[in-house]
Image (cartoon, rainbow, N blue to C red):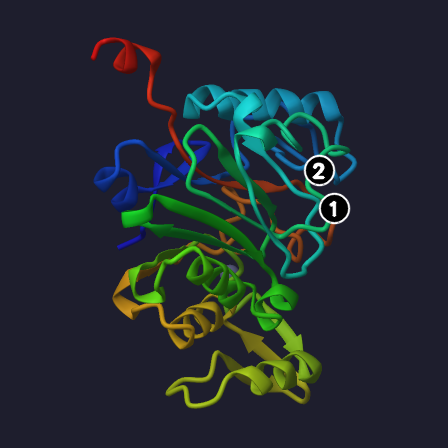
Amino acid sequence: MEPFVHKDQSLLSIESWEERFPDLTAGMTTKLDGVSHEPYASLNMGFHVNDNANDVCANRERVAAKLKLPLQQWVGAEQIHNTSIKKVSKSDRGKGANNYSDSFQGTDGFYTNEEGILLTLCYADCVPLFFHAPEKKMIGAAHAGWKGTVAQIAKEMIQLWELEGIQAKDIHVAIGPSICEKCYIVDNHVVNLIENILEDVDRKPYNLISAGQYSLDLRLLNKQLLIKAGVPEKQIIVSNLCTSCEQELFFSYRRDQGKTGRMLSYIGWKEKSFVEEGSR
Ligand SMILES: [Zn+2]
């Protein structure tokens, strides 16, 4: 069963997590129901792709309203396909939310255990990773294209959380909509890098399709690296949705030949309302 379920046409949420934790908001946007024009039509969430910034802000305001988490509570990043992950707190809120210039520089992952912060990252084919350790209320997000994946950003998050007193066996991970094996062709260089970090797997995440050309299942590779880092397989859920195959639903960097919009992954705890606090 697909773990990312339509909340409406522009939001896919991680249903099993949200059902179990009603204060948790986690999922990914589609490309539908926004105001941007081609080639960013229509719900482009990325500031860095040369779309009109006012349109991107309008799209973000729409999503913020639907999620009931205002832009002032978002954090965003200048993503560089690296493994730098930042722990954020309430004082960071709003950075990278309504413009690109004050986003976290050179950052491809976030985590926090504070309420009222929405961790956001942008995608068009790369793999969105969502992390959750229920007992410590820790949540995280990471952007894993092939570079971040082979540089092991997934393992980096697990190691940072271990420093916070969280064991890998207590971490749950969701792997979001991203490019599928059929649509993702890589060369020897990438496969050699994968070989360096992945031994002892029953099933290789890639297949040779012609001389020096491989199809790569980047979602499976991330899952295998998470298992290797100690996350129990039963706690990893994987989307089957492909950003390139599902042309009506998603932007795809490869399919759209580089000129396209970005979807947004999001995860955050809703702030307990003042009403609740005041009524004690
Ligand atoms: Zn595909």
| Amino acid identity at mark 2 | Pro
- Counting from the top left corner in percent of width and height, residue 166 is at 36, 58
Badge 1 local density, few (<14 within 10 Å), some, or many (20+)?
some
Whether residues under marks 1 and 2 lie with C-beta atoms below 8 angstroms apart, the answer is yes
Residue 69 vs 277, above or below: the answer is below
Q: Which of the two labelled residues, at mark 1 and mark 2, occupies the earlier sequence position?
A: 2
Determine which residue is flagged by label 1: 259
Query: Residue at left 73%, top 45%?
Result: 105
| Amino acid identity at mark 1 | Lys
Determine which residue is flagged by label 2: 39
Residue 43 position by quadrant: top right
Camera-side residue of 59 and 147: 147
- Counting from the top left corner in percent of width and height, residue 231 is at 35, 68
Please tell me whether mark 1 sits on a helix, a strand or a loop. loop
Q: Is residue 34 visible?
A: yes
Residue 53 vs 185, above or below: the answer is above
Position of 278 with respect to 211 (left or right) is left
Query: Residue at left 33%, top 22%?
Result: 272
Camera-side residue of 172 and 9: 172
- Counting from the top left corner in percent of width and height, residue 255 is at 64, 55
Q: Is residue 239 visible?
A: no
- Counting from the top left corner in percent of width and height, residue 275 is at 29, 10
Badge 2 local density, few (<14 within 10 Å), some, or many (20+)?
few
Query: Residue at left 46%, top 60%?
Result: 163
Quarter holding the N terminus? bottom left
Residue 190 vs 121, above or below: the answer is below
